[in-house]
Amino acid sequence: MTQKNHIKSYVHIKNNTVSLNGTVVYNDNEPDFKSFIKGAYKAVDTKYPKFFKMDSLSKLAFLAGDIVLNSEQLSTEEEHNIALVFSNKASSLDTDRKHQKSIQHKENYYPSPAVFVYTLPNICIGEISIKHKLYSENSFFIFDGFNAAHLEVYATSLLADEKADKVLCGWVEYDGDDNYEAFLYLVSPEGKIAHNTEEIIKLYTN
Amino acid sequence: MEALKQELKENIIEQLNLEDISVAEIGDNDPLFGDGLGLDSIDALELIVMLDKDYGIKLTDPKEGKVIFESVEVMANYISANRKK
C-alpha cells in the first residue's frame, strides 16, 4: 500500500516578506534584496556568519530552508535523512554574470574565487546541508516555471523508495532585486495538508 | 605603514564580506585564519587575488599565503617590500 504523505510546513519569501505556514514572520520596505535579506536574517535569529559570504541565490535558499527546518526543531548534533529537491528558472545566472564581468577584459582580469564558487545553482543546497547536517539525496532542476507535478512525483518517489525520511522541496529563484522568490515546503508522513499537485499549487499561489 | 594596515583591514572586511566586524576589532597581530578572524580556504584565494589586483604582487605558490597572511602586520610588511603599484 502506498504511504500517504503530507506537507508539514512551508515558507514563502517574496516581495520583502517572509511567511511561515501562511503567517508573516518578517516584512520590511528595504529598496534592495541585500538589505531585505539581511534584515530577515537578523529577524529570524539565524546565527550563521557564513551567510554573508553567500551569493544572493544561496542567501535566499538558505534562509528559507533554515526557517522550515528550524520549525522542525531538529538537533544540529546528529544527521538527518531529509532530501532536498529544489528548482528554478534562472539557475545561478546572477552570479554567472558577476563572474563573467570579472573576466571580461584581459587587462582587468581578476576572477573572484568567492564569486566563482557560486556559479552553480545547487551550491545553495550544499549550504543548507552543511548547516543542518544533511548527507542526503539532493537534486536541483531548471524549469520554465514552478513545476508542482514534477516536484510531487520526485518527492513521493524518494519517500516510497525509502531514500529519505522527509523531503524539502520547492522553488528558489533569484535574478536581480526585482525577481526573487523562495517557496519551500517539507514533505513528511506527518502533517495535515495532503501532498498532491493541487495543494502544492494552492500554497504556492496564495 | 599605519595607513597601509588601515587600508588592509578595510579591504579584508569589504572583500571577504565580514559582516559585523569593524576595523577596530582587527588587531595588527591577530591571526587571520584559525582562531582569529576564522577565514577559510576561499578567503585565502581571495586575498591572493587582492594582492595582485591592488598591489601588483603575484603569488605563484598558494602555500606562500600561509606565511604572508598570518596577520595584518605581516601582510603590510610583505606588501611594503614587494608592491609594484
Image: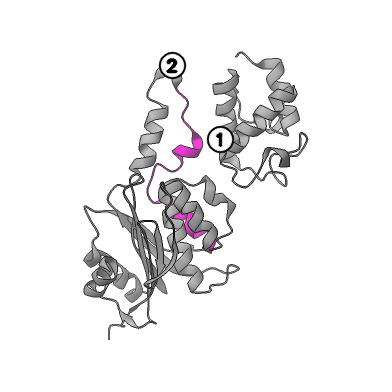
The image position of residue A99, as x and y in percent, is 40, 33
The image position of residue A1, as x and y in percent, is 27, 86
In front: A37, or A140?
A: A37
In this picture, residue A2 sits left or right of residue A37: left
For the image, the number of numbered tags is 2
Task: Please say whether residue A123 is visible from this viewpoint.
Answer: no
Q: Is residue A131 magenta?
A: yes
Question: At x 29% / y 71%, what residue is drawn?
Answer: A203
Which dot marks residue B1?
Answer: none
Seen in the picture, residue B4 relative to A35 is either above or below; the reply is above
Question: At x 49% / y 33%, what residue is drawn?
Answer: A112
Question: Which chain's residue wears label 1?
Answer: B
Q: Which residues are magenta?
A: A109-133
The image position of residue A32, as x and y in percent, is 41, 46
Disc 2 residue crowd, few under 14, some 14–19, many 20+, Cα 10 Å:
few
Q: Quadrant of residue A156?
A: bottom left
Viewer-nearest of discs 2 and 1: 1
In front: B62, or A56?
A: A56
Question: At x 50% / y 52%, what residue is drawn?
Answer: A38
Question: Which chain's residue wears label 2?
Answer: A
Q: CA distance from mark 2 to mark 1?
A: 21 Å
What SS does tag 1 mark? Answer: helix
Q: Which residue is mark 1?
A: B15
Q: Amino acid at mark 2?
A: Glu
Question: At x 56% / y 50%, what residue is drawn?
Answer: A50
Give the residue furthest to the bottom: A1
